[in-house]
Amino acid sequence: MQTINNIISSAASVEPKAYRDAMSHYAGAVQIVTTDGPAGRRGLTLTAACSVSDAPATVLICLQKVHEDNRLFIENGVFAINTLAGTHQQLADAFSGRIGLTQDERFELATWDRLATGAPVLSDALAAFDCRVVSIQDHSTHHVLFGEVIGLRSNADASALIYLNRRYHTLEL
């Protein structure tokens, strides 16, 4: 075991399947992250998003490297995190790729707005965070994008869509 800058690491690791199985018990808000710009438009469903800081307002998202089109988020340098309401389960499935729709067909399923960056913002999202990429870290199988929030919108009247035990659940607020 080594200690570097107070970070402890070990050569031993857990098996990926065991890790995924344990993480399935970790409830997460369901998000559709989007980007648009010179490189193109893309959106996908994920739960790997979180707050980093409130001053300046900063969030992060984790994108799988195996999906080549995720490079559009990096090339455009902007993204929006759209936190889904309980009524958005079919939209979450569409953007997860489970239904087999093209990107254009996915975006046609909802109404989208634009804030400061031009990344698509879901009109009736529970919350939307419009972000400019300020840092990118590659870690193993994922790109971790840090975004400064330069615009936001929230809808306090909606229920929340969460993902737990590999299923969607609605949480009344």
Image (spheres, rainbow, N blue to C red):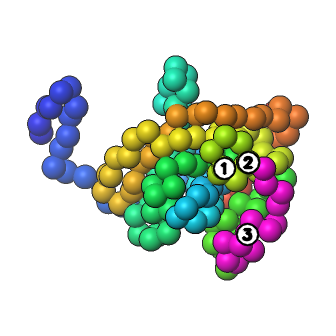
Q: Are marks 1 and 2 in contact (CB under 8 Å)?
A: yes
**Is residue 123 a member of the stretch shown in magenta?**
no
Amino acid on which disc 3 is placed? Arg
Q: Is residue 34 above or below residue 51?
A: below
Callout 2 crowding tier (Cα within 10 Å): few <14, some 14–19, many ≥20: some
The quadrant of the picture occupied by the N terminus is top left
**Residue named by callout 1:** 118
Q: In the figure, residue 26 lies in which quadrant? A: top right
Give the Cα distance between marks 1 and 3.
Answer: 18 Å
**Residue name at image x 20 percent, y 26 percent:** 6
Question: In what element is the residue under mark 1?
Answer: loop
For the residue pair 46 and 20, the one nearer the viewer reads as: 46
Residue extent of the magenta highlight: 101-113
Amino acid on which disc 1 is placed? Gly
**Residue name at image x 41 percent, y 48 percent:** 144
Residue 114 bears which disc, if any? Answer: 2
Q: Residue furthest right?
A: 157
Residue 103 bears which disc, if any? Answer: none
For the residue pair 92 and 57, the one nearer the viewer reads as: 57
